[in-house]
Image (spheres, rainbow, N blue to C red):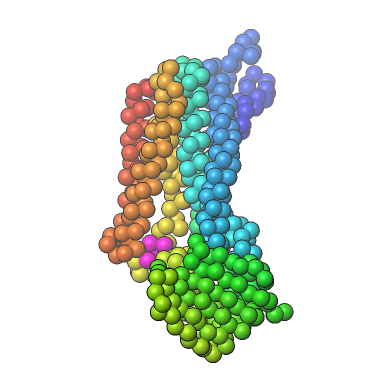
Amino acid sequence: MGSCLLCRTGSAEARFFWDKPVILQENTDKLGTLPDYPLREAKLIILQKYFFREWFWTFLATVVVLLIVMLGVSLGEMLRDIAGGRLPSGLLGTLILLKMPDLLGTILPLSVFIAVIWGLGRIYRDQEMAVMRASGFHWTLMLRPLFFLLLPVSAFLLISGLVLSPLAASATQKSLENAFRNAAEWGLQTGKFHVLRGGNLILYVESVQRDGRTLEHVFIQQRDGDREQVWAAEKGYYWLDPETGNRFLTLENGRITEGGADTLDFGIMRFSRNDLRLPEPENRRRADALEAQPTSAILFSVEPAEATEIQWRLTPAVAVLVLGMLAIPLGHSAPREGRGGRAVLGVLAYIVYANGLYMCRNWMAKGEFPLIPGLWWVHLLVLAIAVIWLRRQGRVIGKA
């Protein structure tokens, strides 16, 4: 139970702590005199709740701050892609919402790590830990409130990585495919020049038919180095190649005027139909196609890319547990030592850990690193360092 529960029956007193009853016999002339050991255990339960509250509220605050930062970064990338013609402006809100599972997979492990280090740093700085140690508080008693925080977060990330993230990636692909069938969702406005690819592609459409897909009187100007092309067509429409994922703007009944700024070599070509490929990074298309695969379809695959994707989906859930264990020795500080130095050391440890995972992921996807041990050796190495550091710290502090 959370607190001591006393019930008196005759000359015996039953005291409950750690969810187990202990019967303490006492003389009737000394009723009310209690041994110290159960009382000490009851105080430790209160201290465990204190640790949990400290870490939990710091964790929530860190999540909010990091989420705002990451949303700002993602929004900037999406706006850049919209300006380059790679994303439809009408899907901005939907795409940000669908990106949330991936963002949380990055934010939550780091938030737990920072919360534990920062919370312990405050407790050490205010000399509260010195008082707790003097009362017999041992570092192992911090593990129970720590796992009360880590396990729910890890379970959520496990579900998110295996289920929510693939569903969000698949929904993103379907939304983009549907957007190509509707010029309004793509952000195309009639009677207005649209500047794409940093000014190298300019698109103008006089009107759009009621189906939202067919464009009328299309004008395109694009530059490629010193060469410049001007496209003019009576009709056009967007479409997406389902096999390659490439995006095209098909023009009908038009002509192309091509020339250079420093030459008189101009050419005019007429066409009944011509497909203009729109900009799309190839690496993004391949990554999105793999990320959209359901976990059940690639769970037992031996292909390097698919096996790497499965391990990567499990990584955030495992990283929460590893970083939580590493945060306890990193949060320890000497008297009068500020917590800022420990926070910086924690960030450096996180960078090394994350970079190790990213490098192994790239090597595995290219077939340059075996699938076993795969990413697991990075997790096990950091976890072993954390456990050894904890045991060494426990010997230095001493047992209560």
Of residues 359 and 53, the one nearer the viewer is 359
In the current view of this chain or complex, which residue is farthest to the right? 210
Q: Quadrant of the N terminus?
A: top right
What is the count of numbered marks? Answer: 0
Of residues 223 and 168, the one nearer the viewer is 223
Residue 247 visible in the shown view: no
Determine the image quadrant of residue 209.
Answer: bottom right
Return the x and y of residue 27 as percentages of the image width and height. 60, 13
Q: Main secondary structure of the magenta part?
A: helix
In the current view of this chain or complex, which residue is farthest to the top? 29
Return the x and y of residue 103 as percentages of the image width and height. 53, 52
In the current view of this chain or complex, which residue is farthest to the bottom? 272
Q: Is residue 31 above or below residue 304?
A: above
Determine the image quadrant of residue 51.
Answer: top right
345 horizontally vs 278: left or right? left
**Which residue is at 48% across, 76% downward?**
229
In the current view of this chain or complex, which residue is farthest to the front? 264
**Which residue is at 35% across, 43% downward?**
352
Q: Is residue 291 above or below residue 318?
A: below
Residue 359 visible in the shown view: yes
Of residues 379 and 167, the one nearer the viewer is 167
- Is residue 278 inside the magenta stretch? no
228 horizontally vs 149: left or right? left
Q: Is residue 93 above or below residue 226?
A: above
**Which residue is at 58% across, 16% downward?**
34
Q: Quadrant of the C terminus?
A: top left
Which range is magenta? Answer: 305-309
**Which residue is at 50% across, 51% downward?**
105
